[in-house]
Image (spheres, grey):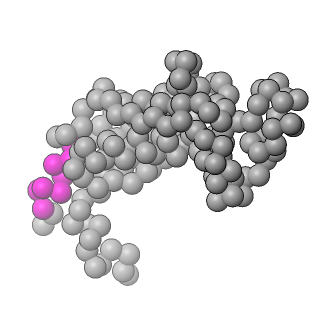
Amino acid sequence: MPDPQARLWFRRIAVGQEHSVSRTVSESDVYSFAGITGDLNRIHLNAPFAKTTKFGDRLVHGAYILGLISAASTKLIDASGGFAVAYGHDRIRYLAPSFIGDTLTVLYRPTDINHSSGRVHSEVEVRNQYGALVTVGSHIVLFLDEEATTSSSVGDE
């Protein structure tokens, strides 16, 4: 029988509750991210080239911004006291470019909580230091019962 404490996470999450993460993106962040992922696109790394584009400067990787969204979702998970994993990103749109030196702030806000499935859908907004909206989308986390994730039979067939 599942431990009732394993499902108490939903009592600590509410629609509209906000979690945020801010980070100033450094040049070393972009170079490290490029090296880790293998995304060596010159729009991220080659300043002389980037200056010739319509953006006028090097762009922060979109996947790096997704990482900041993930950090904000972790704040929601930690505040809940439960255990959850990312279940998906939906309708992610990059509305404006983000550059090295920008301070990006993610606002993460639950919009739907499904207690029976354990899924929490959240709206995501990312703004730069000027308040410009640079990225929007939605994110889903899946809460799991602690007992099910620590059982020695998980994954055994």
Where is residue 8 drawn, in percent x and y? 16, 48
Residue 16 visible from this viewpoint: yes
Where is residue 110 drawn, in percent x and y? 34, 33
Residue 127 position (above or below residue 60): above
User: In front: 134, or 109?
Assistant: 134
Residue 136 visible from this viewpoint: no
Where is residue 29 drawn, in percent x and y? 61, 47
> Which residue lies at the image location 77% right of the left edge and 26% below the top edge?
55
Where is residue 39 drawn, in percent x and y? 73, 52
Q: Locate the N terminus by quadrant.
A: bottom left
92 relative position to 43: left or right: left
Q: Locate the C terminus by quadrant.
A: bottom left
122 relative position to 99: left or right: left
> Which residue lies at the image location 44% right of the left edge and 50% below the top edge?
87
Secondary structure predominantly adopted by residues drawn in magenta: helix
Question: Per the image, is 6 magenta?
Answer: yes
Which region of the structure is painted magenta? 3-10
Q: Count the marks.
A: 0
> Which residue lies at the image location 34% right of the left edge and 34% below the top edge?
19
Residue 133 position (above or below residue 50): above
> Which residue lies at the image location 17% right of the left edge and 40% below the top edge?
11
Question: Per the image, is 114 magenta?
Answer: no
Asked which quadrant contains residue 14, the reply is top left
Residue 17 position (above or below residue 12): above
Asked which quadrant contains residue 2, the reply is bottom left
